[in-house]
Image: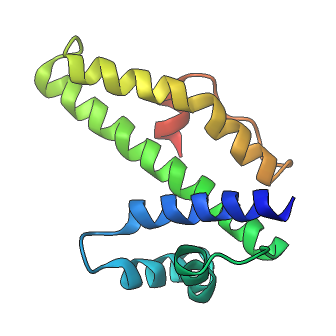
Amino acid sequence: MPEADVLRARSMASDLLSWETRGPGDTANAMRRIATRYGVPYSAQWALRYRPPKRVWSDILKTLQAAHAAERERQLRKLAHDVEITARVAGADHPAVAAAEAALRASDAPARVDAQALDPRAPARGRGTAEAVSRG
C-alpha cells in the first residue's frame, strides 16, 4: 500500500505545483509558496518531484490532501467566475461557456466528496454547480 500512497502524493504534489507555477524557472519559488500557504514542507515537495520516496508519512499525505482539495476549490471558483464574465460578454450560448459549465458540472461531485472526506464535520455543500463554486 505504500506505493499507492506515494503515487497519490506525487500526483497531488504535481497538481499543486502545476497550478502554482507561473512559468519556466518558477518551480522552486512555487514550492515555497505552497509551503507557506498550505504547510506542505518544501523538502517533501522536492523529494516527491525529484527523488520519489519509498513511503510517505501520514501527516505529509494528509497535508497534501487538504492542500489539494483547497487549491482545487480555488481553481473551480476561478473557473466559475470566468464563466460568468464570458457569458456576459459572449453570451450564454457560446461554445466556450457551454464547455466550461460542463467541466464545472463534471467536477462538482468529486470536489464535494474530497472536502467531506478530509473533514467529516464539514457541512455538505449545495447541489448547484455555480452555487457551490461561487459561494466559497
Q: Position of residue 110 (x, y in %)?
A: 65, 35
**Foreground pick, 53 / 127:** 53
Q: Residue at x 60, y 75 (%)?
A: 48
Q: Which quadrant of the view contains residue 29?
A: bottom left
Q: Position of residue 85 (x, y in %)?
A: 22, 34
Residue found at the very far bottom of the displayed protein: 43
**Foreground pick, 82 / 58:** 58
Is 75 located above or below residue 101 in the figure?
Answer: below
Q: How many marks?
A: 0
Q: Residue at x 74, y 35 (%)?
A: 124
**Foreground pick, 119 / 2:** 2
Q: Residue at x 47, y 52 (%)?
A: 74
The N terminus is located in which quarter? bottom right
**Foreground pick, 8 / 65:** 8
Residue found at the very far top of the displayed protein: 93
Q: Which quadrant of the view contains residue 39?
A: bottom right
Position of 61 compared to 97: left or right?
A: right
Q: Position of residue 3 (x, y in %)?
A: 78, 62
Position of 58 compared to 98: left or right?
A: right
Is 135 located above or below residue 41 in the figure?
Answer: above
Is 112 located above or below residue 23 in the figure?
Answer: above
Structure colour scheme? rainbow
Residue found at the very far left of the displayed protein: 89
Position of 78 compared to 125: left or right?
A: left
Q: Residue at x 50, y 37 (%)?
A: 133
Q: Position of residue 67 (x, y in %)?
A: 61, 64
